[in-house]
Image: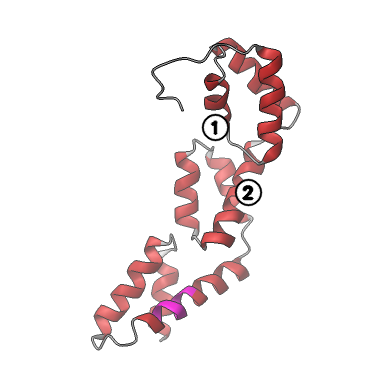
């Protein structure tokens, strides 16, 4: 929304506060999303900063909680690896500390089980490939693209 050539009329701090509380309560948000939303309501910089502080104070906005929720969600629904999740969080301007905490919230047991499952699924789809090196490269490329660590992928490739 930030690329609009027209600026919406300022709806006022009180109305904006009600809207933004609902926006943050509906689902976890990051600071960047909330800031853009507030500017889209026509607020001025000082008003945006004031409401951001208030949201943080009242725990509507919590970067660590957002990062953990994001990481868990992307891992469970899209089966992303830690590298891709970390990259996406970095793109959302999340602090290194929160990214680290979020990635640690994914259990190693679940993580390795998901990686193994994806590995086995991809192995089936490339089963007709005769060349072992091409087969391994296809599996490796797929898992790297999903955001898994090269050393974990290579461990699996060398086991088989």
Q: Nearer the viewer, residue 153 or 55?
A: 55
User: What kind of element bears circle 2?
Assistant: helix
Residue 150 shows up from this direction:
no
* Residue 7 position (above or below residue 110): above
Residue 72 place in picture, x, y as percent: 61, 55
Judging by the rendered image, the residue that carries numbered circle 1 is 33
Quadrant the C terminus occupies: bottom left
Judging by the rendered image, the residue that carries numbered circle 2 is 68
Q: Which residues are magenta?
A: 118-123
Circle 1 or circle 2, nearest the eye: 1
User: What kind of element bears circle 1?
Assistant: helix
Q: Earlier in the sequence, mark 1 or mark 2?
A: 1
* Residue 60 position (above or below residue 89): above
Q: Is residue 122 magenta?
A: yes
Residue 125 place in picture, x, y as percent: 37, 80
Instruction: Find the distance from the CA under tag 1 to the CA under tag 2.
Output: 16 Å
Picture quadrant where residue 144 is located: bottom left
Q: Is residue 152 left or right of residue 74?
A: left
* Residue 139 position (above or below residue 85): below
Q: Nearer the viewer, residue 95 or 28?
A: 28
Identity of the residue drawn at 25% across and 79% down: 134
Identity of the residue drawn at 54% across and 13% down: 45
Residue 120 place in picture, x, y as percent: 46, 80
Residue 110 place in picture, x, y as percent: 61, 69
């Amino acid at each position: 929304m930030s690329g609009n050539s027209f600026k919406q009329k300022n709806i006022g701090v009180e109305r904006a506060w009600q809207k933004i509380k609902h926006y943050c309560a509906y689902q976890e948000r990051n600071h960047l999303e909330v800031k853009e939303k507030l500017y889209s309501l026509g607020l001025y910089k000082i008003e945006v900063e004031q409401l951001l502080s208030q949201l943080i104070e009242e725990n509507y906005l919590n970067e660590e909680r957002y990062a953990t929720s994001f990481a868990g969600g992307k891992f469970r629904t899209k089966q992303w690896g830690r590298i891709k999740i970390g990259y996406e969080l970095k793109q959302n301007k999340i602090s290194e500390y929160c990214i680290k905490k979020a990635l640690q919230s994914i259990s190693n047991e679940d993580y390795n089980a998901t990686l193994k499952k994806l590995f086995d699924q991809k192995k089936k789809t490339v089963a007709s490939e005769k060349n072992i090196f091409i087969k391994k490269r296809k599996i490796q490329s797929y898992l790297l693209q999903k955001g898994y660590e090269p050393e974990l992928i290579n461990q699996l490739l060398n086991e088989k």
